[in-house]
Image (cartoon, grey):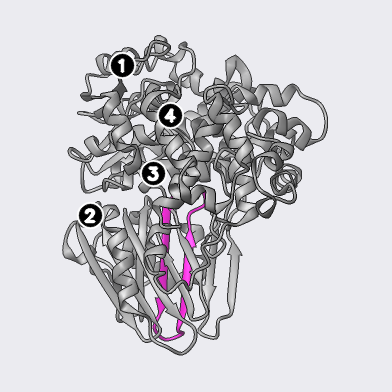
Amino acid sequence: MCGICGEYRLDGGLPDLNHIQLMMNKLEKRGPDHAGTFSDGALAFGHRRLSILDLSEKGNQPMLDPDLSLALVFNGTIYNHPELREQLTAKGHRFFSTGDSEVILKAYAEWGEDCVKRFLGMFAFAIWDLKARTLFMARDRMGIKPLYYAFTDKGLRFASNTQALLASNAQGEIDTSIDKAALHHLFTLHAVVPAPMTILKGVRKLQPAHSLLIRENGEQTLSRYWELNATRPKQERTDQEWIDAIHESLKTAVRRRNAISDVPVGVLLSGGLDSSLLVGLLDEIGIEHIRTYSIGFDDQPEEKGSEFEFSDAVVERFKTDHHKIHIPNEQTLKRLPEAISAMAEPMFGQDAIGFYLLSEQVAKDVKVVQSGQGADEVFGGYFWYEKMNQAKGTPLERFRPFYFDRDHEEMVEMLTPDYVDRDYTADTMRELLEAPGADTFIDAVFRADTTMLIVDDPVKRVDNMTMAHGLEARVPFLDHQLVELAARMPPHLKLQDGGKYALKQIARGLIPDSVIDRKKGYFPVPALKFVRGEFLEFMKDALNSKKCRERGLYRREYVEKLLAAPDAYHTRIQGNKLWHMALLEYWLQDNGL
């Protein structure tokens, strides 16, 4: 796992190497083990390395293959790189390193742009062809690894986060004004801004499952190399056959993410079904000495601050090497600005601070962890799925009342006229839910969640918060082959028994029943759930600041209404609306915008 950046001049000039250094400075935490640069005429690369595979200097990047006239910067892990290495060796390629980076170079030389179709894993990379003078960039199918870019009058810059791009923007070449369409999505889909948009007009992100080829004349070719099929297969399966197939696919996903590492791999154990099942599957495939990590916070009068009673049961069952981390409330609030500073884009999920603080402690012990993100979206774990399924009307009419944080009318009430005109989010979701390739409405919902909504909410949040401490998070529930299988599974195997029926059946007898049968929990951060004290003051400071007033984004009467009753206004999935507004304003100010 790493941080990557680069600049490609398309105006006949040379890249500014100071831009590369400024961007690398903002990527240091993503890759604390090594820093490297490469330049060739109009192209310059920068790389910060977190050493996971081939710990020797031969695995350092940017990686240059003189024989192939190719150079690479890469962030991620290719889990099937040993198999690909064998195939490429049989075709005559010779390797000088043992990791997955060089496999990408050889694969591109052998198969061209189609190489991405052969990769199993999470990745964002850029390849410079020294002869053809082309830049090829690609992002993994599930969007687990980020890739941001900005076109200026002079060319292209790209990086693993927006902070790096903004650091190179001293001359204001990147348009940092707010994108109205992105803003509408942000406040409607609880911080989801679908690619290629970001909240800033001049900063874009490569879509998941896409590649982008840029030629020296500025010509661009954007290609989609994978789509998710949410229709039933022709060959029927019984419910048990589906569950058995999911079980085997999930074991394969967990095995891949444990085996492909030259350093130890731990598990983030929340005490919920998903992370507990990961521990059970690791034990089932014969992994010994499993390392697990749990976090808890101080209790509030209304809510417990930890789920240790459930994670402890899993630890006792499997005798893991367990690390229990407790964070006092005062530290949660004190460190909140750091977590926001680590966000490549504004994120409303209040568990971000939990992941940030947990990752800090875990990174002291391991460099790689498996995490349970994606299970709820892929296997139907949220309460609103069944409500949508029972609703009547068009796909958008069934989806909107249970998911949208605000209807368009409230957006008009909240935002000043310069920042809101039409219902952009409704247009996006209507198109997504009505696209072909889904047998039923709820199949289309799961597909939308898996391919877009999850990418720019929990997946992005986990990447940002773990990589802020040089910790690589691997997410087996988003193994694309497992996702493909689950997308074709009959919906009742997800919705039954309160959701995630197939996973509960797999877990039964493998992990403690108390974990399977418990009420669904969410990452508990009580200090941020109840708006009072220092947390409320934090939000007041942001929303009443001179910069906020001068920005003119929010209507003051709406701000005053929410500040008068800060705990009274919540979204349909129980997000605090005041927090959403304050978080965006603080993020903008923190990034000098």
**Residue wearing tag 1:** 308
Circle 3 crowding by C-alpha within 10 Å: few under 14, some 14–19, many from 20: many
**Residue wearing tag 3:** 340
* Inter-mark Cα distance, 4 to 2: 40 Å
Q: Position of residue 350 (x, y in %)?
A: 44, 32
> Which residue is more in the foreground, 269 or 81?
269
* Residue 200 in the figure: left or right of residue 287: right
Please report the residue visible at 46 percent of the width from the left and 57 percent of the height from the top: 593
Residue 536 got which mark?
Answer: 4
Q: Secondary structure at mark 3?
A: helix
Residue 234 got which mark?
Answer: none
Q: Secondary structure at mark 2?
A: loop
Label 3 vs label 1, nearer the camera? 3
Q: Is residue 270 above or below residue 477?
A: above
**Residue wearing tag 2:** 51
Q: Which stretch did the figure color magenta?
A: 120-145
